[in-house]
Image (tube, grey):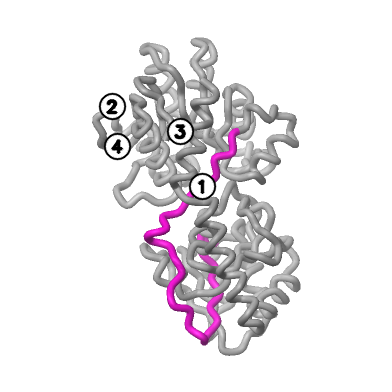
Amino acid sequence: MKNLLSKKVLYVYSGKLRKDAIGIDLVVKKQIEALVNSGCKVFLISRGVYKHNLVFNLSLPITPALLFSFFPARYYYNAQYRFFSFLGALVLALFPFDFLVVWSGQGLAMLNVAKNKKIKSFLNCQSSYKKIYTRDDYLWPYIKLSQIQAEYKIADFLFLPSNFSKSSFLSEGFKKNTLVEIGRGVDLSRFFSGLKKSQPIRVVFFGSVTERKGIFQALRAWKLADLKDAEFLVIGKIPKEIFHEVMSFSAPNIRFLGFQKYPEKYLSTSHIQILPTLFEGMAKTLIEGSACGLVTLTTRNSGFPILDGLNGFYIDRGNIDEYAKKLALLANDRKLLNYMGKKSEQYVKQYLTWEQFQQKFINGILFNI
């Protein structure tokens, strides 16, 4: 990996960096690992700790945002974002750094300081360009859409999780040379194809069991496909607000498994994954499923790279009939299913490893500071 020897970076992230990191926690850990492996000195402000002799941790597990812990989650987490943005801006103003790395929604104050001090700033964006998916009618401390859009414009460079995400920024007039697609990765020692039983065909919905992710479209497509000797696994916690509506689809061939700490034990022996999501940056669950040899049915908005007819199919979110037809096609053509499953696994191994992610991340910094 190319090096950033002795360069000093302020890295700010409001999360906990749990030991068994998943989601954005894991992405953050992989970025910090890449920075220290390239010789960079990291000043990390977060609610967790990254242990390394090149990392100075300002860890604040308890913050003033705790006052909002009894309010809806959107207020609590946005209060955390505001606190860490303020604290990061203070540290950035007081000490010398070569560049700043921060996350969208958490960085406006820091980005303004970086701009004034002429320090290069890199903003991690979790999704595509936010234009309609963020509410502006919630009360403070909620981060409004206008603030997130302001971050996009002030940051020198944007780290983006997928080509779809990059395209969404290009369509809004952002300059191509400010957009750095770094993708995402997967642990291939954990997620890999296991023994695929000849029966039954297993279809998986894996992720947050929400309307945004497309749980109701997936369940309706499953019902319409009416597959014999097949089962549908729903992996993820069901929010209490939609629990009864989701459970109204209960059937003998549907298993609601809830949150699973080790989802790979189900993915490795499954065949198809379905995620009719409204929007993502890059759906990590689809990467993990593909690494296990699953054929993917999803929307373009998932950010996941589909080679149509090779590793899966893009299907419009509302086209329930087409999802059902593709489920039936794959379930009834075992040769095609096996072929596409192998292509899925091969694609992830070639393009979506954490090593490749880290190299893209470091290159994005090296070529721009």
Q: Which of marks 3 and 4 is in front?
A: 4
Span colored in magenta: 180-209
Q: What element carries label 3?
A: helix
Circle 4 residue: 50
- Point out residue 204 in the picture as x, y percentages from the top left corner: 53, 71
* Quarter of the picture holding the N terminus: top left
Amino acid type for the residue under numbered disc 1: Arg
Of the numbered discs 4 and 1, the one sitting upstream in the chain is 4
Question: Which quarter of the picture shows residue 129?
Answer: top right
Pointer 1 local density, CA inside 10 Å: few below 14, some 14–19, many at least 20: many
Q: In this view, does 143 lie to the left or right of 354?
A: right
Mark 3 touching mark 1, by CB under 8 A?
no
Circle 2 residue: 56
Circle 3 residue: 81
Which residue is nearer to you in this view: 247 or 87? 87
Q: Which of marks 4 and 1 is in front?
A: 1
Of the numbered discs 3 and 2, the one sitting upstream in the chain is 2
Which residue extends farthest bottom?
229
The residue that appears at 53% across and 10% down in the rendered structure is: 116
The residue that appears at 34% across and 32% down in the rendered structure is: 36
